[in-house]
Image (cartoon, rainbow, N blue to C red):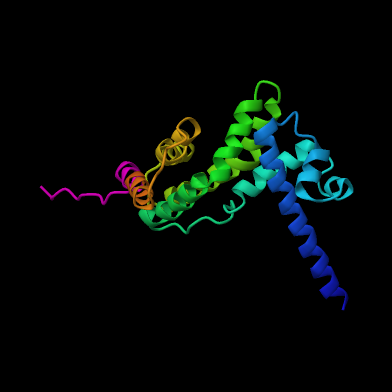
Amino acid sequence: MTPALSAYHQRVADEKRALIVRAATELFLELGYDRASLARVAESAGVSKATLFKQFPTKAALFDAIVIDSWAENDVADVPPAGDLSAGLTVLGRRYATLVSRPEMADLFRIVIAELPRFPELAKAHFSQGKLPYFESVRIYLSTERDAGTADIADPETAATQFLGMISNYLFWPRLVLPDWKVTPARTTAVVDEAVRTMVARYGERPRRHRPAK
């Protein structure tokens, strides 16, 4: 009987956590990070202040949770196997395209940019707990392809930056300044596929040609 009760209470706690994170994101965008008090977040989420403080004792901890949740679909450990550079990059590229195309991702960046002068720690949290782990998953994957001899990549860090940049420069960054920027699913697929082709053309291991014997 106890495990069932524990599962129930865990589900309720998870539901309340989701309500708090959603309410905090909306209030941070509406009022700014500084003016959105935890008490107001609790009221907007429909939970008691005690419940909120139990899960998030500080506003910084709440922002960290927003960042982590926004990037949570992409685990560093979830790296495609080496052996096919095109297939592996396609998996990572489509996953990244889905991630940066979500409305809440642009919302999160707007919070960071708006509050950067007064709260530079928000940008640090966003990078260290959000972007960096995902970037690392791509770098690790490219390193495994290099080590397997299936890619000629001297600097996996630079290559990962190039790959993600080709995708985000079209799918994400215009959304921050152009409210009407829309990208169709077909165009999204084309952007990722072109980025993959560019990477394979640049870094794919080519068969060595044997010179004819003299």
- Res. 147 visible in picture: no
Q: Quadrant of the N terminus?
A: bottom right
Which residue is painted at 79% across and 58% down in the image?
13
Viewer-side residue, 43 vs 143: 43
Which residue is painted at 77% across and 42% down in the image?
41
Q: How many marks?
A: 0
Which residue is painted at 75% across and 53% down in the image?
17
Viewer-side residue, 188 vs 159: 188
Let me know if residue 173 is in the magenta part.
Answer: no
* Above or below 113: residue 161: below
Question: Going by the picture, which residue comes out furthest to the bottom?
Answer: 1
Let me know if residue 212 is in the magenta part.
Answer: yes
Q: Position of residue 76 (x, y in %)?
A: 58, 51
Magenta residues?
A: 196-214
Question: Going by the picture, which residue comes out furthest to the left?
Answer: 214
- Res. 172 visible in picture: yes
Q: Position of residue 136 (x, y in %)?
A: 55, 44
Q: Which of the 4 image quarters holds residue 103?
A: top right
Viewer-side residue, 178 vs 213: 178
Q: Position of residue 68 (x, y in %)?
A: 66, 46
Q: Position of residue 96 (x, y in %)?
A: 48, 48
Relative placement, left or right, of 186 versus 28 is left
Q: Which of the 4 image quarters holds residue 128?
A: top right
